[in-house]
């Protein structure tokens, strides 16, 4: 017999089941079409443990960058049983290294890259991993347990570059809330929360389109409904920052004519049907948004953390977007479980990027 739960306990239990369902659906999509994911920080214990889990569960084909003997020695020390299923590539001995160095030189020679410098830089696991992806030999990469965001992004932008029509990288946060009446049964995707501090109208439009795509490929939201957030709804306030959001909405519609998007909208008008109907009558997004686009990074970062802490929501990410092939950044304080989930998320992005 199940224990009788108090209302708050029951609500928490329901939220846990909903969270499991979403995470499990992401993992299931990853399993359905396994992608080749590079983990360049192969001698980092959390990363190697997460790789072992991913290999055991068959959510991706894992490529580890580093010395095979050192990787297997660490795996034995940690008691890992599945690392033998990974592809291990050592830049110091790989027959592909010279080919990748030449590719790096060709990609960067107009930026001052020399053949000698390329031969050295290709030995960096983060660069080597991005070159594997650029060559079509892998589908995505994850780093950051040891590296900074800049160290993760630099080779990605230099080698893989931005997706067609996109000139800025942004970060989306998958928000799993305790309020199923909002978003997609309580799930919302918010951007930008991590990368571009003060986007102009063109960049904000790109962030909107990319965040909607993340909602589809990662959160499984079949029909993203994008709200361009502001402190104004449909001209209720006048300011140049409101004008930027209005212009960004127009540009986003040009970039993605089929995208359901509206702005500018205040957060309550975007989420609450009664408020949306009152403040923005006739809008198909107002009161029904499942994708929220903040007008600047400051708002996005503060906003998601308030929802996470005060609303007890789960925040998954940031998920980097705008790069031609997925490259994701971890927090240096990440857990094994965080890395495992990011492998599945990156795999889902990679399917969509092809």
Image (spheres, rainbow, N blue to C red):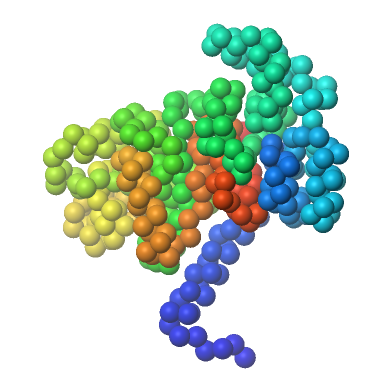
Total marks placed: 0
Q: Residue at x 55, y 27 (%)?
A: 154
Q: Quadrant of the N terminus?
A: bottom right
Kindly tell me whether residue 29 is visible in this rendering: no
Q: Quadrant of residue 42?
A: top right
Which of the two residues, 289 or 239, is positioned nearer the viewer here? 239
Tell whether 271 sits left or right of 275: right
Is 15 situated left or right of 79 in this image?
left
Q: Position of residue 309 (x, y in %)?
A: 40, 61
Left or right of 9, for residue 86:
right
The C terminus sits in image quarter: top right
Frontmost residue, 73 versus 309: 73
Q: Residue at x 59, y 41 (%)?
A: 144
| Residue 214 placement (x, y as % from top left) | 50, 44
Q: Is residue 147 visible?
A: yes
Rendered position, 77 above or below 250: below
Q: Residue shown at 81%/35% (left/top)?
A: 67
């Amino acid at each position: 017999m199940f224990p009788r739960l108090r209302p708050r306990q029951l609500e928490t239990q329901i939220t846990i089941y909903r969270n499991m369902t979403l995470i499990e659906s992401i993992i299931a999509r990853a399993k359905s079409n396994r992608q080749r994911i590079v983990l360049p920080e192969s001698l980092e214990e959390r990363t190697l443990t997460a790789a072992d889990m991913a290999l055991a569960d068959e959510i991706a084909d894992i490529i580890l960058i580093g010395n095979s003997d050192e990787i297997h020695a660490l795996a034995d020390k940690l008691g890992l049983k599945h690392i033998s299923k990974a592809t291990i590539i050592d830049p110091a001995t790989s027959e592909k290294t010279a080919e990748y160095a030449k590719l790096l030189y060709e990609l960067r020679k107009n930026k001052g890259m020399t053949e000698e410098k390329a031969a050295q830089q290709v030995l960096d696991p983060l660069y080597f991993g991005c070159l594997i992806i650029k060559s079509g030999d892998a589908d995505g990469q994850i780093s950051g347990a040891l590296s900074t965001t800049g160290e993760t992004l630099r080779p990605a932008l230099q080698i893989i570059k931005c997706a067609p029509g996109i000139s800025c990288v942004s970060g989306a946060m998958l928000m799993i809330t305790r309020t199923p009446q909002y978003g997609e049964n309580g799930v919302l995707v918010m951007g930008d929360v991590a990368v571009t501090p003060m986007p102009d109208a063109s960049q904000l439009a790109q962030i909107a389109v990319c965040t909607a795509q993340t909602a589809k490929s990662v959160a499984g939201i079949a029909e993203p409904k994008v709200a361009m957030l502001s402190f104004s709804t449909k001209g209720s306030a006048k300011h140049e920052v409101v004008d930027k959001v209005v212009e960004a909405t127009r540009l986003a519609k040009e970039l993605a004519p089929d995208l359901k998007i509206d702005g500018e909208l205040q957060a309550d008008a975007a989420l609450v049907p009664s408020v949306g109907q009152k403040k923005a009558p006739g809008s198909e997004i107002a009161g029904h948004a499942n994708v929220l686009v903040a007008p600047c990074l400051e708002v996005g970062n503060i906003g998601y953390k308030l929802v996470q802490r005060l609303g007890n929501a789960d925040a998954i990410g940031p998920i980097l977007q705008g790069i031609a092939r997925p490259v994701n950044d971890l927090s240096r304080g990440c857990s094994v479980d965080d890395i495992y989930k990011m492998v599945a998320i990156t795999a889902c992005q990679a399917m969509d990027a092809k």
